[in-house]
Image (cartoon, rainbow, N blue to C red):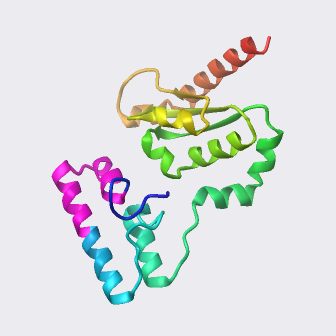
Amino acid sequence: MTNPLTGPTGASRVFGPQKGADPEMVEQLDDNLKHYAALIRQDLGVDIELIPGAGAAGGLGAGLLAFTNASLRPGIDIVIDVTGLEEHIKAADYVFTGEGGMDFQTKFGKAPYGISKLAQKHQKPVFACAGYIGEKVDVLYDEGMTAIFGILSKTGSLEEALKQGKENIERTAENIARVLLVANQ
């Protein structure tokens, strides 16, 4: 994740509402994180507030930077290196990715975003599947995603969706394959 600790794309504003924080709570959380950053800047001489990734995991990145002298690296970059994913993408005709939910937050360094950017570099179409498609997902089209598919066939509880996960992804994958077959005739 590339979110800074505070501000419009910081930990509180992006992840707070996901965790149940109302707008007033988000403001309070962001103010508290600003205060935390100011204390660290004052006492340790380390400015963690706007560093990309400092807001990851609720601010864990900031703590690691301040107290352990760690360096931050996006997890997707590590996965790409360890798996040799770039070579696989170069050799592929299509790239498929997905996650439980896709929305504007996906752009802040989640795996599908990293995969999409890598595929875009090699001019490969990217098809993403998600359990749900959320707010402002259209920003991902500008970042290299060709198409995004929600896999749920009906509304229901998370428990029910998980029970039907295999069936849902298989059906969606088959539908994508059918479209690709027709498009390539």
Tell me the chief SS of the magenta region.
Answer: helix
Asked whether 115 or 46 is in front, the reply is 46
Q: Is 11 one of the magenta-colored residues?
A: yes
| 126 shown above or below 79 | above
Q: Does residue 113 appear left or right of residue 78 in this picture?
A: left
Find residue 166 and report its image quarter: top right
Find residue 5 and report its image quarter: bottom left
The magenta span reads 10-32
Asked whether 127 or 140 is in front, the reply is 140
The location of residue 124, given as percent across then percent down, is: 73, 35
Asked whether 7 or 145 is in front, the reply is 7
Identity of the residue drawn at 28% across and 69% down: 34
Identity of the residue drawn at 34% across and 82% down: 40
The location of residue 43, given as percent across then percent down, is: 33, 89
Asked whether 104 or 84 is in front, the reply is 104
The location of residue 156, given as percent across then percent down, is: 35, 27
